[in-house]
Amino acid sequence: MVKKNPPKSFYIRTYGCQMNELDSDLMAGALIERGLVKKETEEEADLLLFNTCSVRDLAERKVMGKIGRMGRRSFSNKIIGVTGCMANNKKESLFAKLPQIDFMIGTNNIHDLNPVLDEFLTTGEQQIRTDGTFTHELDYSVVDRSDPLKAYVTIIRGCDKYCTYCIVPYTRGPEVSREPQSIVDECRELVAKGTKEITLLGQNVNSYGKDRPDWGVLFHDLLYQLDKIPGLERVRFMTSHPCDISPDLMMAVRDLPSLCELVHFPIQAGSNRILKKMHRMYTKEEYFEKVAKLRSLVPDVSLGTDIIVGFPTETEEEFEETYRAMEEIGFSVAFIYAYSPRKGTPATRWADDVPESEKQRRLQKLMALQENFYLRDRENLIGQVVEVLVEKRNQKESQYLKGLTRCWKNALFPGGDELIGTLQKVKIHSISHHTLIGDRV
């Protein structure tokens, strides 16, 4: 038992997805309300929090290495806490590997941060809270938000899809939707404080409300409610599962002025056999049908995807099916990964039989294809007028303002600081790398 002094300051390091970023901001807000001061470096702070990700092995190894180096004497008086997916995934075994950790709280126990900290300070004994299901409504009013214009808002936690490669259902638990009025109220408060763009978050946002049929509010219903908030200029959402992309959602993308024309719903693979092995619950043909339907309703829609290469038993011919699917659809945004086995997922019962060198070759081939699409996608916008939310002045070329289009492309144009925080129409005249360059209309 080693008692440590109550902390006066804290530092949070975040790994992983946007959900983790928002969870970190939520914990930061709770600690600030407690009276602690937020610091920018580990050396300055008394309490160190590592909000972790378990989706890929590399993310876990980064955290293990980072905390492992903190066994040195210079960190012996600091309180070290691990939060997020890794706490749920590793549980008490993490204490055995890294005894310098003082407490752990999982993704469903963010509300326990201050009570767990108090318990550790009182007893000096390691503490852990890792519930399997999210049950406690969080106080999002305390979130420590650093961006005055854009905000993340969680609408659903957990996942029920159980893709065979994915650890998320085991670290975040089953789907739990957040009460719709709570979401609307938070968005109203954010807009009142100056927020222009809100991104709705969930492991599968399209499942929103299906666990609570008594509410009578599904995802598209929620979007219609949010669109009525005066002053809310833009709404985005991520991530979607193709099974739950409904015609009602497609029509919301078409009809709602605030809803951005970017839909991210990962195909993951172009082979039906591999999709079945991944437990994705759709065929390539069904995915293509939804793409065609969405594009018929929203001709200028941009599509995003995730893709895994080198899944167990994937043949060269099946990889080529994925290549051709990417080629045919033409994604505006693509996150492409080489498969790595995650302990605790069903996919580990199959041999990881695609050599690493082959995974990397396939990965590079898809990335080269996607790079061509990025270039073509942006070249098609030359001469077009796009809407840009002006966020800040560009650091490297200070004569330009910087912002994002509705379809998630960076854009630069010359202008004064008075335009920051506004929506501007910009006519694109050129591109530099992946950035659009234009002039204000």
Image (cartoon, rainbow, N blue to C red):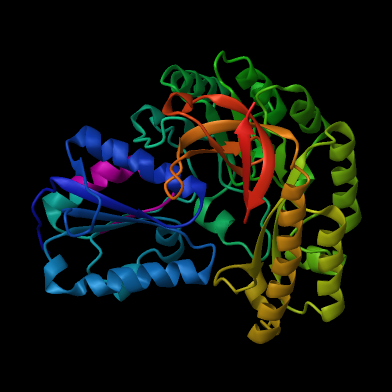
Residue found 42% across the figure and 72% down from its top: 61
Q: Quadrant of the N terminus?
A: bottom left
Q: Is residue 110 inside the magenta stretch?
A: yes
Picture layout, residue 380 above or below residue 155: below
Instruction: Examine the image and state in which quarter residue 226 appears.
Output: top right
Query: Which residue is drawn at the image coordinates 69% and 73% (left, top)?
Result: 363
- Picture residue at 59% right of the left edge, 26% below the top: 424
Q: Where is residue 241 in the image (x, y as percent from the top left)?
A: 72, 47
Magenta region, residue range:
103-118
Question: Which of the 4 image quarters holds residue 425?
Answer: top right
**Image check: 226 left or right of 43?**
right
Residue 169 in sight from this viewpoint = yes
The answer to whether any part of residue 109 appears in the image is no
Residue 242 pos. (x, y %): 77, 47
Residue 227 in the image, given as x and y percentages of width and height: 64, 19
The front one of 298 and 345 is 298
Magenta span contains residue 2: no
Q: Is residue 128 left or right of residue 56?
A: left
Number of numbered markers = 0
Residue 74: x %, y % from top left: 12, 69
Q: Is residue 379 left or right of residue 106?
A: right
Q: Which of 257 and 181 is in front in this view?
A: 257
Say whether residue 140 is left or right of residue 165.
Answer: left
